[in-house]
Image (cartoon, grey):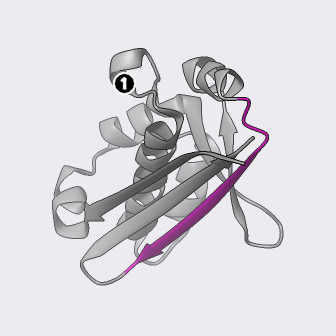
Amino acid sequence: MIVGIGIDIVDLDEFRARLSDALVREVFLPAETAYASSRARPWESYAARFAAKESAMKALGAGLSQGVRWTDVEVLRGADGDLGLRLDGRALEAAREKRVTRSWVSVSHSETTAAAVVVLEA
């Protein structure tokens, strides 16, 4: 049964202008940083992961104002290329409250935007 759906869209020009070492440290975990930094256009990968984190918070019904930290949501890339989430802290608590057993993550980007959708199952 679906217990949460979240979607987010990020303007790439705006995100790229805000992207800094401080933002990367605040929002992304080491594996996310390593992946995005290895890409030819790293801001696109960072923006897609940012959108996925926002989407996850929306699907959980818990965000920054409920104590979730950016680093409580990690976007993982499996060996098969599929994306998933690893939750910690308040995000994990919210997932347990919703009895989440599985997450589905999809990201995409064009020349101007990055988008993500997260679906949570129980």
- Reply above or below: 116 against 119: below
Q: Position of residue 3 (x, y in %)?
A: 62, 42
Q: Position of residue 76 (x, y in %)?
A: 68, 53
What residue is shown at x 61% (from left), y 60% (from top)? Answer: 105
Q: How many marks?
A: 1
Q: Secondary structure at mark 1?
A: helix
Instruction: Identify the amino acid type marked 1.
Output: Leu
Residue shown at 31%/62% (left/top)? 9
- The question of residue 102 being in magenta is answered with yes
In the figure, residue 7 lies in which quadrant? bottom left
| 76 vs 83: above or below | above
Front one among 96 and 18: 96
Of 105 and 13, which appears nearest the observer? 105
State which quarter of the image contains the C terminus. Answer: top right
Q: What residue is at 56 percent from the left and 18 percent from the top?
A: 90
Q: Residue furthest front?
A: 1
Q: In front: 12, or 94?
A: 94
Q: Which residue is pictured at 57% across the width and 37% down the height? A: 73
Residue 38: x, y in percent?
Answer: 55, 67
Residue 9 is left or right of residue 104, and the answer is left
Q: Where on the picture, by quarter, is residue 94?
A: top right
Instruction: Determine whether 78 is above or below 120 in the image.
Output: below
Q: Dot 1 surroundings within 10 Å: few (below 14), some, or many (20 or more)?
A: few
On the image, the x and y values in percent for residue 4 come to 56, 44
Q: Which residue is mark 1?
A: 64
Residue 91: say if magenta: no
Describe residue 28's horizontal placement relative to residue 79 as left or right. Answer: left
Question: Which residues are the magenta region?
Answer: 99-109
Front-most of residues 12 and 40: 12
Per the picture, the main secondary structure of the magenta-coloured stretch is: strand
Return the residue found at the far right. Answer: 79
